[in-house]
Image (spheres, rainbow, N blue to C red):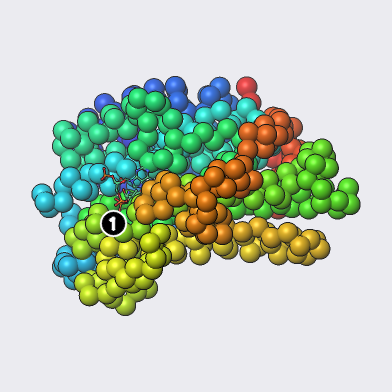
Protein backbone atom coordinates (compact mmCIF):
# COMPACT_ATOMS: atom_id res chain seq x y z
CA UNK A 1 0.00 0.00 0.00
CA UNK A 2 1.28 3.46 -0.86
CA UNK A 3 1.52 6.01 1.95
CA UNK A 4 -0.48 9.23 2.06
CA UNK A 5 0.82 12.41 3.56
CA UNK A 6 -2.10 14.13 5.28
CA UNK A 7 -0.18 17.24 6.08
CA UNK A 8 -0.21 18.06 2.35
CA UNK A 9 -2.74 20.58 1.14
CA UNK A 10 -3.83 17.94 -1.34
CA UNK A 11 -3.95 14.40 0.10
CA UNK A 12 -2.30 12.09 -2.37
CA UNK A 13 -0.39 8.89 -2.90
CA UNK A 14 1.52 10.15 -5.93
CA UNK A 15 4.35 11.71 -3.98
CA UNK A 16 3.27 15.19 -4.99
CA UNK A 17 5.77 16.74 -2.64
CA UNK A 18 8.63 15.52 -4.84
CA UNK A 19 7.40 17.53 -7.81
CA UNK A 20 7.21 21.18 -6.77
CA UNK A 21 6.03 22.46 -10.17
CA UNK A 22 3.15 20.03 -10.31
CA UNK A 23 2.28 20.66 -6.68
CA UNK A 24 2.20 24.40 -7.26
CA UNK A 25 0.06 24.01 -10.38
CA UNK A 26 -2.48 21.92 -8.46
CA UNK A 27 -2.39 24.28 -5.49
CA UNK A 28 -3.16 27.05 -7.94
CA UNK A 29 -6.13 25.10 -9.36
CA UNK A 30 -7.48 24.11 -5.90
CA UNK A 31 -9.06 27.50 -4.99
CA UNK A 32 -10.70 27.61 -8.41
CA UNK A 33 -12.17 24.18 -7.70
CA UNK A 34 -13.42 25.31 -4.28
CA UNK A 35 -14.96 28.42 -5.80
CA UNK A 36 -16.69 26.23 -8.41
CA UNK A 37 -17.94 23.94 -5.61
CA UNK A 38 -19.27 26.96 -3.75
CA UNK A 39 -21.09 28.32 -6.80
CA UNK A 40 -22.13 25.15 -8.61
CA UNK A 41 -22.08 22.41 -5.97
CA UNK A 42 -24.93 21.50 -3.61
CA UNK A 43 -26.68 24.74 -2.81
CA UNK A 44 -27.17 25.90 0.77
CA UNK A 45 -25.71 22.93 2.68
CA UNK A 46 -22.19 24.21 3.20
CA UNK A 47 -22.62 24.56 6.97
CA UNK A 48 -24.18 21.11 7.45
CA UNK A 49 -22.24 18.25 9.03
CA UNK A 50 -22.54 15.32 6.68
CA UNK A 51 -21.63 11.74 7.57
CA UNK A 52 -19.26 11.11 4.66
CA UNK A 53 -16.73 8.56 3.64
CA UNK A 54 -13.39 9.92 2.53
CA UNK A 55 -10.83 7.97 0.53
CA UNK A 56 -7.69 7.73 2.65
CA UNK A 57 -5.73 4.98 0.91
CA UNK A 58 -5.99 2.48 -1.90
CA UNK A 59 -5.87 -0.53 0.39
CA UNK A 60 -8.74 -2.90 -0.50
CA UNK A 61 -9.12 -3.78 3.18
CA UNK A 62 -9.81 -0.24 4.39
CA UNK A 63 -9.55 2.54 1.86
CA UNK A 64 -12.05 4.94 3.41
CA UNK A 65 -12.79 6.62 6.71
CA UNK A 66 -16.24 7.78 7.83
CA UNK A 67 -17.12 10.85 9.84
CA UNK A 68 -19.03 14.13 9.99
CA UNK A 69 -17.59 16.65 7.53
CA UNK A 70 -18.72 20.00 6.19
CA UNK A 71 -18.62 19.54 2.43
CA UNK A 72 -16.33 22.48 1.61
CA UNK A 73 -13.80 20.90 4.03
CA UNK A 74 -13.93 17.50 2.31
CA UNK A 75 -10.41 16.18 1.65
CA UNK A 76 -10.46 15.78 -2.12
CA UNK A 77 -7.33 13.83 -2.85
CA UNK A 78 -5.43 12.13 -5.63
CA UNK A 79 -5.19 8.38 -5.39
CA UNK A 80 -3.89 5.92 -7.92
CA UNK A 81 -4.31 2.17 -7.44
CA UNK A 82 -1.01 0.46 -6.68
CA UNK A 83 1.06 -0.26 -9.79
CA UNK A 84 0.99 -3.77 -11.24
CA UNK A 85 4.59 -4.88 -11.57
CA UNK A 86 5.80 -5.35 -15.16
CA UNK A 87 2.34 -4.60 -16.51
CA UNK A 88 2.10 -5.17 -20.26
CA UNK A 89 -0.29 -3.72 -22.83
CA UNK A 90 -3.25 -6.12 -22.89
CA UNK A 91 -4.81 -5.44 -26.30
CA UNK A 92 -4.36 -3.74 -29.66
CA UNK A 93 -1.47 -3.70 -32.09
CA UNK A 94 1.17 -3.18 -29.36
CA UNK A 95 -0.10 -5.96 -27.17
CA UNK A 96 2.57 -7.50 -24.93
CA UNK A 97 4.82 -4.43 -24.87
CA UNK A 98 5.42 -2.60 -21.56
CA UNK A 99 2.76 -0.07 -20.57
CA UNK A 100 3.64 3.64 -20.76
CA UNK A 101 4.40 5.88 -17.82
CA UNK A 102 4.63 8.85 -20.17
CA UNK A 103 2.42 9.51 -23.17
CA UNK A 104 3.87 8.80 -26.62
CA UNK A 105 3.64 12.07 -28.60
CA UNK A 106 1.45 10.61 -31.35
CA UNK A 107 -1.34 9.75 -28.87
CA UNK A 108 -1.22 12.92 -26.87
CA UNK A 109 -4.20 14.73 -28.32
CA UNK A 110 -6.43 11.63 -28.38
CA UNK A 111 -5.64 10.77 -24.78
CA UNK A 112 -6.19 14.36 -23.74
CA UNK A 113 -9.60 14.29 -25.42
CA UNK A 114 -10.54 11.05 -23.63
CA UNK A 115 -9.38 12.35 -20.25
CA UNK A 116 -11.13 15.70 -20.73
CA UNK A 117 -14.35 13.96 -21.77
CA UNK A 118 -14.21 11.70 -18.73
CA UNK A 119 -13.30 14.64 -16.47
CA UNK A 120 -16.10 16.80 -17.86
CA UNK A 121 -18.81 14.38 -16.72
CA UNK A 122 -17.78 14.55 -13.06
CA UNK A 123 -18.44 18.23 -12.26
CA UNK A 124 -21.35 18.11 -14.74
CA UNK A 125 -23.18 15.59 -12.58
CA UNK A 126 -22.63 17.69 -9.45
CA UNK A 127 -24.10 20.68 -11.27
CA UNK A 128 -27.07 18.64 -12.47
CA UNK A 129 -27.85 17.58 -8.90
CA UNK A 130 -27.23 20.96 -7.30
CA UNK A 131 -30.76 21.65 -6.08
CA UNK A 132 -31.84 18.16 -5.08
CA UNK A 133 -30.96 18.60 -1.42
CA UNK A 134 -33.96 20.88 -0.96
CA UNK A 135 -36.40 18.04 -1.70
CA UNK A 136 -34.62 15.09 -0.10
CA UNK A 137 -36.92 12.15 0.78
CA UNK A 138 -34.89 11.46 3.96
CA UNK A 139 -31.66 12.36 5.73
CA UNK A 140 -30.27 8.98 4.65
CA UNK A 141 -30.87 9.91 1.00
CA UNK A 142 -29.55 13.42 1.49
CA UNK A 143 -26.32 11.99 2.79
CA UNK A 144 -26.05 9.60 -0.16
CA UNK A 145 -26.59 12.48 -2.59
CA UNK A 146 -23.75 14.42 -0.96
CA UNK A 147 -21.54 11.34 -0.86
CA UNK A 148 -21.98 10.91 -4.60
CA UNK A 149 -21.35 14.64 -5.14
CA UNK A 150 -18.09 14.85 -3.19
CA UNK A 151 -16.79 11.70 -4.87
CA UNK A 152 -17.60 13.05 -8.32
CA UNK A 153 -15.60 16.07 -7.19
CA UNK A 154 -12.71 13.74 -6.33
CA UNK A 155 -13.02 12.08 -9.73
CA UNK A 156 -12.61 15.50 -11.29
CA UNK A 157 -9.42 15.85 -9.23
CA UNK A 158 -8.26 12.49 -10.60
CA UNK A 159 -8.55 13.68 -14.21
CA UNK A 160 -7.13 17.12 -13.44
CA UNK A 161 -4.09 15.46 -11.89
CA UNK A 162 -3.47 13.57 -15.15
CA UNK A 163 -3.92 16.74 -17.19
CA UNK A 164 -1.50 18.71 -15.02
CA UNK A 165 1.05 15.94 -14.65
CA UNK A 166 1.21 14.80 -18.28
CA UNK A 167 -0.07 17.51 -20.64
CA UNK A 168 1.84 20.67 -19.66
CA UNK A 169 0.26 24.01 -20.51
CA UNK A 170 -2.51 22.37 -22.62
CA UNK A 171 -3.45 20.25 -19.64
CA UNK A 172 -3.57 23.25 -17.30
CA UNK A 173 -5.83 25.09 -19.74
CA UNK A 174 -8.12 22.07 -20.05
CA UNK A 175 -8.31 21.85 -16.25
CA UNK A 176 -9.56 25.44 -16.12
CA UNK A 177 -12.07 24.74 -18.88
CA UNK A 178 -13.46 21.83 -16.86
CA UNK A 179 -14.65 24.43 -14.35
CA UNK A 180 -15.82 26.89 -17.01
CA UNK A 181 -18.25 24.65 -18.93
CA UNK A 182 -21.54 24.09 -17.10
CA UNK A 183 -24.33 21.59 -17.37
CA UNK A 184 -27.13 22.92 -19.55
CA UNK A 185 -25.31 26.22 -20.25
CA UNK A 186 -26.42 27.61 -23.61
CA UNK A 187 -22.95 28.97 -24.48
CA UNK A 188 -20.61 26.53 -22.73
CA UNK A 189 -22.43 23.26 -22.18
CA UNK A 190 -20.89 20.03 -20.92
CA UNK A 191 -19.44 17.81 -23.64
CA UNK A 192 -21.78 14.81 -23.57
CA UNK A 193 -25.54 15.14 -24.06
CA UNK A 194 -26.80 13.32 -20.95
CA UNK A 195 -24.80 15.64 -18.72
CA UNK A 196 -26.82 18.60 -19.92
CA UNK A 197 -30.16 17.06 -18.94
CA UNK A 198 -31.65 18.57 -15.78
CA UNK A 199 -31.88 16.24 -12.77
CA UNK A 200 -34.48 18.10 -10.76
CA UNK A 201 -36.31 15.32 -8.96
CA UNK A 202 -35.21 12.29 -6.98
CA UNK A 203 -36.74 9.74 -9.31
CA UNK A 204 -34.48 11.15 -12.02
CA UNK A 205 -31.57 11.10 -9.58
CA UNK A 206 -32.09 7.39 -8.88
CA UNK A 207 -32.40 6.72 -12.62
CA UNK A 208 -29.27 8.79 -13.27
CA UNK A 209 -27.23 6.89 -10.69
CA UNK A 210 -28.62 3.59 -11.99
CA UNK A 211 -28.09 4.21 -15.74
CA UNK A 212 -25.63 7.06 -16.18
CA UNK A 213 -23.26 6.13 -13.38
CA UNK A 214 -23.27 2.63 -14.86
CA UNK A 215 -21.99 4.10 -18.12
CA UNK A 216 -19.30 5.57 -15.86
CA UNK A 217 -18.51 2.06 -14.64
CA UNK A 218 -18.14 0.75 -18.19
CA UNK A 219 -16.10 3.69 -19.46
CA UNK A 220 -13.81 3.61 -16.41
CA UNK A 221 -13.34 -0.13 -16.82
CA UNK A 222 -12.34 0.32 -20.45
CA UNK A 223 -9.94 3.15 -19.55
CA UNK A 224 -8.56 1.01 -16.71
CA UNK A 225 -7.26 -1.30 -19.49
CA UNK A 226 -5.30 1.57 -21.06
CA UNK A 227 -1.64 1.26 -21.96
CA UNK A 228 -1.18 4.68 -20.36
CA UNK A 229 -0.55 3.31 -16.88
CA UNK A 230 -1.35 6.41 -14.77
CA UNK A 231 -4.79 6.57 -16.45
CA UNK A 232 -5.34 2.88 -15.82
CA UNK A 233 -4.38 3.16 -12.15
CA UNK A 234 -6.53 6.27 -11.61
CA UNK A 235 -9.60 4.62 -13.14
CA UNK A 236 -9.11 1.42 -11.16
CA UNK A 237 -9.39 3.35 -7.92
CA UNK A 238 -12.29 5.49 -9.14
CA UNK A 239 -14.24 2.28 -9.76
CA UNK A 240 -14.06 1.52 -6.03
CA UNK A 241 -16.06 4.66 -5.29
CA UNK A 242 -18.31 4.29 -8.32
CA UNK A 243 -19.86 1.09 -6.93
CA UNK A 244 -21.64 3.08 -4.20
CA UNK A 245 -23.14 5.46 -6.76
CA UNK A 246 -24.79 2.58 -8.61
CA UNK A 247 -25.89 1.14 -5.25
CA UNK A 248 -27.72 4.42 -4.60
CA UNK A 249 -29.49 4.07 -7.96
CA UNK A 250 -30.33 0.40 -7.69
CA UNK A 251 -31.57 0.49 -4.10
CA UNK A 252 -33.29 3.84 -4.71
CA UNK A 253 -35.36 2.46 -7.60
CA UNK A 254 -35.94 -0.79 -5.69
CA UNK A 255 -37.33 1.25 -2.76
CA UNK A 256 -39.63 3.16 -5.13
CA UNK A 257 -41.00 -0.15 -6.48
CA UNK A 258 -41.38 -1.52 -2.95
CA UNK A 259 -43.32 1.52 -1.76
CA UNK A 260 -45.57 1.48 -4.84
CA UNK A 261 -46.39 -2.20 -4.23
CA UNK A 262 -47.19 -1.45 -0.58
CA UNK A 263 -49.56 1.34 -1.62
CA UNK A 264 -51.19 -0.89 -4.28
CA UNK A 265 -51.84 -3.43 -1.57
CA UNK A 266 -53.16 -0.85 0.88
CA UNK A 267 -55.64 0.63 -1.58
CA UNK A 268 -56.33 -2.71 -3.30
CA UNK A 269 -55.89 -1.22 -6.76
CA UNK A 270 -53.39 -0.85 -9.59
CA UNK A 271 -55.12 2.22 -10.98
CA UNK A 272 -52.33 4.79 -11.58
CA UNK A 273 -54.60 7.69 -10.61
CA UNK A 274 -55.39 6.12 -7.23
CA UNK A 275 -51.75 5.19 -6.61
CA UNK A 276 -50.75 8.76 -7.37
CA UNK A 277 -53.47 10.11 -5.11
CA UNK A 278 -52.01 7.96 -2.33
CA UNK A 279 -48.65 9.68 -2.81
CA UNK A 280 -46.73 6.91 -4.63
CA UNK A 281 -45.33 6.59 -8.14
CA UNK A 282 -47.33 4.23 -10.36
CA UNK A 283 -45.30 1.66 -12.27
CA UNK A 284 -46.15 2.99 -15.78
CA UNK A 285 -44.69 6.36 -14.75
CA UNK A 286 -41.58 4.67 -13.40
CA UNK A 287 -41.29 2.84 -16.74
CA UNK A 288 -41.28 6.19 -18.55
CA UNK A 289 -38.43 7.46 -16.37
CA UNK A 290 -36.47 4.25 -17.06
CA UNK A 291 -37.06 4.72 -20.80
CA UNK A 292 -35.83 8.31 -20.67
CA UNK A 293 -32.63 7.78 -18.69
CA UNK A 294 -31.69 4.45 -20.25
CA UNK A 295 -32.00 5.78 -23.81
CA UNK A 296 -30.13 8.96 -22.92
CA UNK A 297 -27.32 6.97 -21.30
CA UNK A 298 -27.05 4.64 -24.31
CA UNK A 299 -25.89 7.62 -26.35
CA UNK A 300 -22.87 7.91 -24.07
CA UNK A 301 -21.29 4.90 -25.77
CA UNK A 302 -20.99 6.80 -29.07
CA UNK A 303 -21.83 5.58 -32.58
CA UNK A 304 -22.42 1.95 -33.47
CA UNK A 305 -19.69 2.17 -36.10
CA UNK A 306 -16.83 4.32 -34.91
CA UNK A 307 -13.37 4.84 -36.33
CA UNK A 308 -12.46 6.61 -33.06
CA UNK A 309 -13.13 3.48 -31.04
CA UNK A 310 -11.22 1.34 -33.57
CA UNK A 311 -8.16 3.61 -33.36
CA UNK A 312 -8.36 3.88 -29.57
CA UNK A 313 -8.35 0.11 -29.27
CA UNK A 314 -5.69 -0.57 -31.92
CA UNK A 315 -3.37 1.99 -30.27
CA UNK A 316 -3.91 0.58 -26.78
CA UNK A 317 -5.58 3.72 -25.41
CA UNK A 318 -8.97 2.27 -24.48
CA UNK A 319 -9.85 -1.41 -24.25
CA UNK A 320 -13.05 -3.30 -23.58
CA UNK A 321 -14.28 -3.59 -19.99
CA UNK A 322 -12.62 -6.65 -18.42
CA UNK A 323 -10.47 -7.17 -21.51
CA UNK A 324 -9.01 -10.39 -20.11
CA UNK A 325 -12.38 -12.18 -20.44
CA UNK A 326 -12.01 -12.13 -24.25
CA UNK A 327 -9.86 -14.50 -26.30
CA UNK A 328 -8.85 -12.23 -29.15
CA UNK A 329 -7.26 -8.95 -28.03
CA UNK A 330 -6.20 -7.63 -31.43
CA UNK A 331 -9.41 -8.01 -33.46
CA UNK A 332 -7.69 -7.32 -36.77
CA UNK A 333 -9.64 -9.92 -38.79
CA UNK A 334 -12.91 -10.28 -36.92
CA UNK A 335 -16.29 -9.08 -38.10
CA UNK A 336 -19.66 -8.86 -36.44
CA UNK A 337 -23.24 -8.37 -37.51
CA UNK A 338 -24.89 -5.11 -36.52
CA UNK A 339 -28.50 -4.12 -36.86
CA UNK A 340 -28.55 -0.85 -38.77
CA UNK A 341 -31.53 1.14 -40.09
CA UNK A 342 -30.81 -0.16 -43.61
CA UNK A 343 -30.71 -3.76 -42.40
CA UNK A 344 -28.14 -6.09 -40.82
CA UNK A 345 -24.56 -5.20 -41.78
CA UNK A 346 -21.32 -7.11 -41.43
CA UNK A 347 -18.76 -4.70 -39.95
CA UNK A 348 -15.17 -5.04 -38.71
CA UNK A 349 -15.34 -5.74 -34.99
CA UNK A 350 -12.72 -3.05 -34.32
CA UNK A 351 -15.20 -0.46 -35.55
CA UNK A 352 -18.08 -1.91 -33.53
CA UNK A 353 -16.52 -1.70 -30.09
CA UNK A 354 -18.90 0.99 -28.87
CA UNK A 355 -21.75 -1.38 -29.66
CA UNK A 356 -20.04 -4.29 -27.90
CA UNK A 357 -19.73 -2.14 -24.80
CA UNK A 358 -23.31 -0.95 -25.11
CA UNK A 359 -24.52 -4.57 -25.27
CA UNK A 360 -22.66 -5.62 -22.13
CA UNK A 361 -23.85 -2.46 -20.38
CA UNK A 362 -27.47 -3.33 -21.19
CA UNK A 363 -26.98 -6.82 -19.75
CA UNK A 364 -25.74 -5.22 -16.55
CA UNK A 365 -28.76 -2.88 -16.53
CA UNK A 366 -31.07 -5.92 -16.73
CA UNK A 367 -29.97 -7.19 -13.31
CA UNK A 368 -31.89 -4.57 -11.32
CA UNK A 369 -34.96 -4.93 -13.50
CA UNK A 370 -35.06 -8.67 -12.87
CA UNK A 371 -34.99 -8.03 -9.13
CA UNK A 372 -37.75 -5.39 -9.24
CA UNK A 373 -39.86 -7.56 -11.53
CA UNK A 374 -39.56 -10.46 -9.09
CA UNK A 375 -40.95 -8.18 -6.36
CA UNK A 376 -43.80 -7.12 -8.65
CA UNK A 377 -44.52 -10.75 -9.53
CA UNK A 378 -44.46 -11.84 -5.88
CA UNK A 379 -46.98 -9.11 -5.11
CA UNK A 380 -49.26 -10.73 -7.69
CA UNK A 381 -49.18 -8.12 -10.47
CA UNK A 382 -48.79 -8.77 -14.18
CA UNK A 383 -46.93 -5.50 -14.93
CA UNK A 384 -43.25 -5.91 -15.85
CA UNK A 385 -40.59 -3.20 -16.12
CA UNK A 386 -38.46 -3.40 -19.27
CA UNK A 387 -35.47 -1.67 -20.83
CA UNK A 388 -36.12 0.21 -24.06
CA UNK A 389 -34.57 -1.18 -27.24
CA UNK A 390 -31.11 0.30 -27.93
CA UNK A 391 -32.45 2.01 -31.07
CA UNK A 392 -35.15 3.97 -29.18
CA UNK A 393 -34.80 7.76 -28.94
CA UNK A 394 -31.18 7.90 -29.90
CA UNK A 395 -29.38 11.18 -30.59
CA UNK A 396 -25.99 9.72 -31.47
CA UNK A 397 -25.07 7.11 -34.09
CA UNK A 398 -26.89 5.35 -36.90
CA UNK A 399 -30.30 5.52 -35.21
CA UNK A 400 -30.08 9.20 -34.27
CA UNK A 401 -33.36 11.00 -34.81
CA UNK A 402 -35.15 7.96 -36.27
CA UNK A 403 -38.69 7.16 -35.13
CA UNK A 404 -38.18 3.90 -33.28
CA UNK A 405 -40.60 2.66 -30.62
CA UNK A 406 -39.36 1.27 -27.25
CA UNK A 407 -39.51 -2.29 -28.60
CA UNK A 408 -37.15 -1.37 -31.44
CA UNK A 409 -39.57 -1.08 -34.41
CA UNK A 410 -38.99 1.68 -36.92
CA UNK A 411 -42.38 3.36 -37.16
CA UNK A 412 -44.08 6.27 -38.86
CA UNK A 413 -42.66 9.62 -37.71
CA UNK A 414 -46.07 11.12 -36.95
CA UNK A 415 -47.11 8.12 -34.85
CA UNK A 416 -43.78 8.31 -33.01
CA UNK A 417 -44.24 11.99 -32.23
CA UNK A 418 -47.81 11.47 -31.06
CA UNK A 419 -46.89 8.57 -28.84
CA UNK A 420 -43.65 9.84 -27.34
CA UNK A 421 -45.48 11.24 -24.30
CA UNK A 422 -46.67 7.67 -23.57
CA UNK A 423 -43.08 6.43 -23.53
CA UNK A 424 -41.09 9.11 -21.74
CA UNK A 425 -42.26 11.44 -18.96
CA UNK A 426 -44.78 14.00 -20.24
CA UNK A 427 -44.97 17.49 -18.72
CA UNK A 428 -47.90 16.24 -16.62
CA UNK A 429 -45.86 13.23 -15.36
CA UNK A 430 -42.96 15.50 -14.44
CA UNK A 431 -45.30 17.90 -12.65
CA UNK A 432 -46.78 14.99 -10.69
CA UNK A 433 -43.36 13.63 -9.71
CA UNK A 434 -42.24 17.12 -8.74
CA UNK A 435 -45.36 17.47 -6.57
CA UNK A 436 -44.15 14.50 -4.49
CA UNK A 437 -40.73 16.04 -3.89
CA UNK A 438 -41.03 17.49 -0.41
CA UNK A 439 -38.16 17.69 1.99
CA UNK A 440 -38.24 15.10 4.80
CA UNK A 441 -35.55 15.73 7.38
CA UNK A 442 -36.73 13.99 10.54
CA UNK A 443 -34.16 11.24 11.21
CA UNK A 444 -35.50 7.85 10.07
CA UNK A 445 -38.59 9.28 8.33
CA UNK A 446 -39.18 8.72 4.59
CA UNK A 447 -41.20 10.55 1.95
CA UNK A 448 -44.50 8.94 0.92
CA UNK A 449 -43.18 7.60 -2.40
CA UNK A 450 -40.13 5.63 -1.25
CA UNK A 451 -39.69 2.73 1.20
CA UNK A 452 -36.95 2.93 3.86
CA UNK A 453 -33.62 1.29 3.01
CA UNK A 454 -32.92 -2.15 4.44
CA UNK A 455 -29.97 -0.85 6.42
CA UNK A 456 -28.14 2.35 7.22
CA UNK A 457 -24.66 3.49 6.26
CA UNK A 458 -21.56 1.82 7.69
CA UNK A 459 -23.57 -0.28 10.21
CA UNK A 460 -25.39 2.74 11.61
CA UNK A 461 -29.18 2.57 11.99
CA UNK A 462 -31.47 4.03 9.33
CA UNK A 463 -32.64 6.55 12.00
CA UNK A 464 -29.14 7.99 12.41
CA UNK A 465 -28.91 11.74 11.83
CA UNK A 466 -26.75 11.44 8.71
CA UNK A 467 -26.87 15.15 8.01
CA UNK A 468 -26.90 17.68 10.82
CA UNK A 469 -28.49 20.72 9.25
CA UNK A 470 -27.42 24.06 10.64
N1 LIG B 1 -22.79 13.37 -26.60
O1 LIG B 1 -17.13 7.83 -32.90
P1 LIG B 1 -18.10 8.43 -31.94
C1 LIG B 1 -19.19 8.99 -15.95
C2 LIG B 1 -19.09 12.67 -30.04
S1 LIG B 1 -19.86 8.64 -17.48
C3 LIG B 1 -22.09 14.28 -27.29
O2 LIG B 1 -19.53 8.21 -32.17
P2 LIG B 1 -16.47 7.67 -29.77
C4 LIG B 1 -20.09 9.57 -14.94
C5 LIG B 1 -17.68 12.19 -29.81
O3 LIG B 1 -17.08 12.84 -28.71
C6 LIG B 1 -18.50 8.12 -18.48
N2 LIG B 1 -21.12 13.95 -28.17
O4 LIG B 1 -17.84 8.00 -30.47
C7 LIG B 1 -21.39 9.15 -14.82
C8 LIG B 1 -17.03 12.49 -31.12
O5 LIG B 1 -16.68 13.86 -31.15
P3 LIG B 1 -15.24 14.32 -31.74
C9 LIG B 1 -17.76 9.26 -19.16
C10 LIG B 1 -20.88 12.64 -28.36
O6 LIG B 1 -15.53 8.80 -29.91
C11 LIG B 1 -22.22 9.73 -13.87
C12 LIG B 1 -18.15 12.27 -32.14
O7 LIG B 1 -19.37 12.35 -31.38
N3 LIG B 1 -16.56 8.79 -19.77
O8 LIG B 1 -18.04 8.78 -15.73
O9 LIG B 1 -16.02 6.31 -30.17
C13 LIG B 1 -21.73 10.73 -13.02
C14 LIG B 1 -18.07 10.93 -32.82
O10 LIG B 1 -17.82 9.97 -31.83
C15 LIG B 1 -21.57 11.63 -27.69
C16 LIG B 1 -16.35 8.68 -21.09
O11 LIG B 1 -17.21 8.99 -21.89
C17 LIG B 1 -22.58 12.05 -26.77
N4 LIG B 1 -23.31 11.17 -26.06
O12 LIG B 1 -17.01 7.54 -28.27
C18 LIG B 1 -20.41 11.16 -13.16
C19 LIG B 1 -15.03 8.12 -21.50
N5 LIG B 1 -21.11 10.44 -28.10
O13 LIG B 1 -14.21 13.71 -30.80
C20 LIG B 1 -19.58 10.56 -14.10
C21 LIG B 1 -14.27 9.01 -22.44
C22 LIG B 1 -20.17 10.69 -29.00
O14 LIG B 1 -15.20 13.77 -33.12
N6 LIG B 1 -14.96 9.24 -23.70
N7 LIG B 1 -20.02 12.00 -29.16
O15 LIG B 1 -15.31 15.83 -31.64
C23 LIG B 1 -14.98 8.34 -24.70
O16 LIG B 1 -14.45 7.26 -24.61
C24 LIG B 1 -15.63 8.73 -26.00
O17 LIG B 1 -15.43 10.09 -26.19
C25 LIG B 1 -17.14 8.41 -26.08
C26 LIG B 1 -17.56 8.56 -27.55
C27 LIG B 1 -17.42 7.01 -25.58
C28 LIG B 1 -17.96 9.40 -25.28
Residue 447 left/right relative to 388: right
On screen, 330 above or below 242? Answer: below
Taking the spot 24% from the left edge, 57% from the top edge, the residue there is: 307
Taking the spot 78% from the left edge, 45% from the top edge, the residue there is: 272
Residue found at the very far bottom of the displayed protein:
327
Residue 100 left/right relative to 343: left
Foreground pick, 196 / 305: 305
Image quarter of residue 429: top right
Query: Residue 353's x, y, as percent?
Result: 33, 62
Foreground pick, 463 / 369: 369
Q: How many marks?
A: 1
> In the picture, which quadrant includes the N terminus?
bottom left
Q: Does the beta carbon at disc 1 come under 8 Å from ligand 1? A: yes
Taking the spot 28% from the left edge, 62% from the top edge, the residue there is: 351
> In the picture, which quadrant includes the C terminus?
top right
Query: Residue 404's x, y, as percent?
Result: 50, 53
| Residue 332 appears in the figure | yes
| Residue 51 appears in the figure | no
Q: Report helix, strand or loop for mark 1.
A: loop
Residue found at the very far left of the displayed protein:
105
On screen, 165 above or below 238? Answer: above
Query: Residue 5's x, y, as percent?
Result: 33, 41
Circle 1: is it few (<14), some (14-19), or many (20+) Cα within 10 Å?
A: some
Taking the spot 73% from the left edge, 59% from the top edge, the residue there is: 383
* Residue that carries the numbered disc 1 in the rendered image: 306
Foreground pick, 283 / 339: 339
Foreground pick, 39 / 427: 427
Residue 46 left/right relative to 184: right
Query: Residue 363's x, y, as percent?
Result: 51, 64
On screen, 352 above or below 208? Answer: below
Residue 343 left/right relative to 68: left
Amino acid sequence: MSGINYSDKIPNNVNLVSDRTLQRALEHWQPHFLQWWHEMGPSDFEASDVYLRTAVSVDAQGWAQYGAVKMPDYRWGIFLADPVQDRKIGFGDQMGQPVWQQIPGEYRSTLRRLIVTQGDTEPASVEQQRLLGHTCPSLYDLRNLFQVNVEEGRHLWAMVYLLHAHFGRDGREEAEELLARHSGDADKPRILTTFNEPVTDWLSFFCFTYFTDRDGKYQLKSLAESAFDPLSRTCRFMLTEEAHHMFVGETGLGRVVKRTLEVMKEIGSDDPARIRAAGAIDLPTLQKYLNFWCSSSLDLFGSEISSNSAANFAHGLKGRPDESQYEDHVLRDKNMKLRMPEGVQDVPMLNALNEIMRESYLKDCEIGLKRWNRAIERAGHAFRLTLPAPQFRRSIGAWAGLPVDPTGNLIDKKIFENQLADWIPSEADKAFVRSLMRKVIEPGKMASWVAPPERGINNLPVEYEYVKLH
